[in-house]
């Protein structure tokens, strides 16, 4: 066996690249050799601010693609060499939310990179509770880079489902980062009538156009949000906020049409954003304000298959380190 390098977090702003012993798969477990581990903004967030699920020390990382390296006793569903991706969370399956089909809101999850060692390492253990539920086979010809995007894209699919997205919708996506661009891909799959992206970086906005966005707005040039709304008649059916702060929430309320929906997709460090909401905006325009968090295993499975069919998503990968 080779060495097992791991990025371990010991506390806020205290992380190290270190060598660890390669773990062994116990009964019911899998040992996965990690080929690609995506860097999620939440990795940066917990490094800087911590989080309520974090238990130190912990190996970071949860956007995982690799191969099964060792199969624990009693595991019949997988074999050594299987190409797999692993969901970021192992849901308990017994809490009220899990029983009601809202497993993304599980009360007692094991979360890779938070309270269980994750995939910013050469090898990672998938615990017995996650085998086989949280492990998904990959097509043989699917790249590991694409496969590592299954977890964030599953979050985007959940965002679509939370908003009851339909082909007739005219939508705005606030943010031109990876999650905003993945919303563009999902929007094309769902057949939105029009997709507009609001961002700050021309290079990323050009990628949005390549992925199928109909209009892009660099906010450095379009400083007046009302001018964007006026170009889109009465406004947007759905506004997806992938960069969350007081300004973007306020502007989303201006962009959405009467009877429309706003989806707060991204999280922020605890207590870092405060916002004063005028209830009349919600009342008189019947605007629905929604949250979107995580995904179900069914949505994760859909993510793998949709990404396999839509290989243009690889354009979102900016760096391989």
Image (spheres, rainbow, N blue to C red):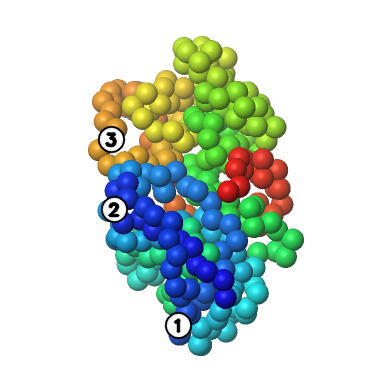
Q: Nearer the viewer, residue 122 or 235?
A: 122
Label 3: how many residues lie within 10 Å, few (<14), some (14-19) or many (20+)?
A: few
Cα distance between the residues tagged 3 and 1: 41 Å
Q: Residue at x 65, y 74 (%)?
A: 81
Q: Residue at x 43, y 68 (%)?
A: 20
Residue 217 relative to residue 263: left or right: right
Residue 109 relative to residue 83: left or right: left
- The mark that comes first in sequence, 3 or 1, is 1
Question: Is residue 279 positioned above or below 8 on the image?
Answer: above
Label 1: how many residues lie within 10 Å, few (<14), some (14-19) or many (20+)?
A: some
Picture quadrant of residue 6? bottom left
Cα distance between the residues tagged 2 and 3: 19 Å
- The mark that comes first in sequence, 2 or 1, is 2
The secondary structure type at the circle numbered 3 is loop
Q: Residue at x 50, y 48 (%)?
A: 39
Residue 302 position within the rendered picture, expressed as x and y whole percent measured from the top left: 60, 57
Q: Residue at x 54, y 56 (%)?
A: 37
Mark seen at residue 26: 1
Picture quadrant of residue 241? top left
* Residue at which label 2 appears: 11
* Residue at which label 3 appears: 272
Looking at the image, can residue 64 be seen? yes
Looking at the image, can residue 136 be seen? no
- The mark that comes first in sequence, 2 or 3, is 2
């Amino acid at each position: 066996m080779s060495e097992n390098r791991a990025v371990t977090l010991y506390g806020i702003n205290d992380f190290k690249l270190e060598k660890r012993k390669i773990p062994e798969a116990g009964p019911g477990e899998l040992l996965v050799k990690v080929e690609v581990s995506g860097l999620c903004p939440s990795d940066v967030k917990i490094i800087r601010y911590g989080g309520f699920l974090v238990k130190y020390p912990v190996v970071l990382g949860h956007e995982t693609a690799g191969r099964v390296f060792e199969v624990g006793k009693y595991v019949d569903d997988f074999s050594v060499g299987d190409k797999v991706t692993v969901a970021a969370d192992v849901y308990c399956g017994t809490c009220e939310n899990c029983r009601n089909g809202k497993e993304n809101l599980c009360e007692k999850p094991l979360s890779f990179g938070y309270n269980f060692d994750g995939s910013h390492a050469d090898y990672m253990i998938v615990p017995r509770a996650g085998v086989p539920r949280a492990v998904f086979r990959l097509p043989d010809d699917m790249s590991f880079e694409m496969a590592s995007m299954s977890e964030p894209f599953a979050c985007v699919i959940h965002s679509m489902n939370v908003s009851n997205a339909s082909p007739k919708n005219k939508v705005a996506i606030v943010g031109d980062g990876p999650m905003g661009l993945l919303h563009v891909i999902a929007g094309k799959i769902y057949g939105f009538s029009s997709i507009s992206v609001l961002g700050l970086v021309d290079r990323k906005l050009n990628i949005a156009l390549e992925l199928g966005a109909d209009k892009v707005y660099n906010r450095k040039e379009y400083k007046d949000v009302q001018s964007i709304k006026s170009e889109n008649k009465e406004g947007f059916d759905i506004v997806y906020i992938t960069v969350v702060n007081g300004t973007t929430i306020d502007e989303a309320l201006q962009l959405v049409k009467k009877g429309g929906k706003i989806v707060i997709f991204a999280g922020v460090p605890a207590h870092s954003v405060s916002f004063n909401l005028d209830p009349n905006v919600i009342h008189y325009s019947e605007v629905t304000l929604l949250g979107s968090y995580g995904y179900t295993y069914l949505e994760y499975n859909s993510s793998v298959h949709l990404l396999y069919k839509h290989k243009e998503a690889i354009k979102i990968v900016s760096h391989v380190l």
